[in-house]
Image: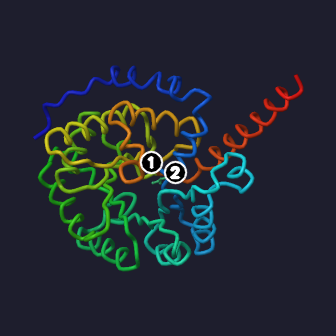
């Protein structure tokens, strides 16, 4: 089906190498880009020792992602800034739903035997239905990597299609676990199949592979998304996830999206960061921004 699509790895690496230094992300606009990044975060906890209390704390952070002094310093009090969603394991969904009530922040649940997906299909589908019944509005599914290794695109399509049906009204993000997929050609083909099978988003990683979100792999997925959009007219979302901890990564990915797909992919309905610990660095950088501006205005006043 897609075996013929060649991907030039070194061209992809060259394309993304300079993203962080782009003019658009230079100092003047950095704070705005970082605030926007917060709107795009799927604030995540996916640990074996997760508890209701940890999820409640995460949800409190999701509702008020920045300290009041930073919000005031940036002059964005009226913005009602929140993260894009909270992402948890299925049994944590009821706790997150309760803690986020009235906030408008959706709860995303991983499902389908996350992270490996090596559970019988009917159980994986039942897991989706259960999470949806508990209030999850978004479901992050994992694929059977072996279907990709065998280039059995029909099996991959059928599996994802069944998951799409089990999601019902919930949005479905298809995690490809790109770090496991061996080649960029496989990443492109799996992206295409996931979109054809009805994925609302394609997502790079579970956060549990050896290699998680990278810019070259993201470029390949984003180009697949663009090709799919050109062929069908459908807009599909993109979620890099796993291993992103720094504010400057939030800038690089947003620039990639803007340059490759345009402004609509800087909105939470078409782009999310899956990250458990990037928000802290974004908050730190915004605090530096305010402190720096304050110091500069005092220097100016004194001169
Ligand atoms: O989907 C989100 C990822 O699991 C988060 O991974 P992380 O903990 O490396 O940020």
Ligand 1 lies under 8 Å from the Cβ of mark 2: yes
Q: Report the quarter where the C terminus lies.
A: top right
- x and y percent of residue 101 in the render? 51, 76
- x and y percent of residue 199 in the render? 25, 55
Ligand 1 lies under 8 Å from the Cβ of mark 1: yes
- Is there a contact, CB below 8 Å, between mark 2 and mark 1? yes
Looking at the rendering, which quadrant does residue 120 occupy? bottom left
Q: Which residue is mark 1?
A: 241
Looking at the rendering, which quadrant does residue 77 occupy? bottom right
Q: Which residue is mark 2?
A: 275
Taking 122 as reference, is 80 above or below it? above
Q: Residue at x 47, y 50 (%)?
A: 40
Q: Residue at x 42, y 52 (%)?
A: 268
- Element at label 1: loop
Q: Residue at x 18, y 53 (%)?
A: 156
Q: Report the quarter where the N terminus lies.
A: top left
Which of disc 1 and disc 2 is earlier in sequence? 1
Left or right: residue 117 versus residue 2 is: right
Left or right: residue 121 versus residue 113 is: left
């Amino acid at each position: 089906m897609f075996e013929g699509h060649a991907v030039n790895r070194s061209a992809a690496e060259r394309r993304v190498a300079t993203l962080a230094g782009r003019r658009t992300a230079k100092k003047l606009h950095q704070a705005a880009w970082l605030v926007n990044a917060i709107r795009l975060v799927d604030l995540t906890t996916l640990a074996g020792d997760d508890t209701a209390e940890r999820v409640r704390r995460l949800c409190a952070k999701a509702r008020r992602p920045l300290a009041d002094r930073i919000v005031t310093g940036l002059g964005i009090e009226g913005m009602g800034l929140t993260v894009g969603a909270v992402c948890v394991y299925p049994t944590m969904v009821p706790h997150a739903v309760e803690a986020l009530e009235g906030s408008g922040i959706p709860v995303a649940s991983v499902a389908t035997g996350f992270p490996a997906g090596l559970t019988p299909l009917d159980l994986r589908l039942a897991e989706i239905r259960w999470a949806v019944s508990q209030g999850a509005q978004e479901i992050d599914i994992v694929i059977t990597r072996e279907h990709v290794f065998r280039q059995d695109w029909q099996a991959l399509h059928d599996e994802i299609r069944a998951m799409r049906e089990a999601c019902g009204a919930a949005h479905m993000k298809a995690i490809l676990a790109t770090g496991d997929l061996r080649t960029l050609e496989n990443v492109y083909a799996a992206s295409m199949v996931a979109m054809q099978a009805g994925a609302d988003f394609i997502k790079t990683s579970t956060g549990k592979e050896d290699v998680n979100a990278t810019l070259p792999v993201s470029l390949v997925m984003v180009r697949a998304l663009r090709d799919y959009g050109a062929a069908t007219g459908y807009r599909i979302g993109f979620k890099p996830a796993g291993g992103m901890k720094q504010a400057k990564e939030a800038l690089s990915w947003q620039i990639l999206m803007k340059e490759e797909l345009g402004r609509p992919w800087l909105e939470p309905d078409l782009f999310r960061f899956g990250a458990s610990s990037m928000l802290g660095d974004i908050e730190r950088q915004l605090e530096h921004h305010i402190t720096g501006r304050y110091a500069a205005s005092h220097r100016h006043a004194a001169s």
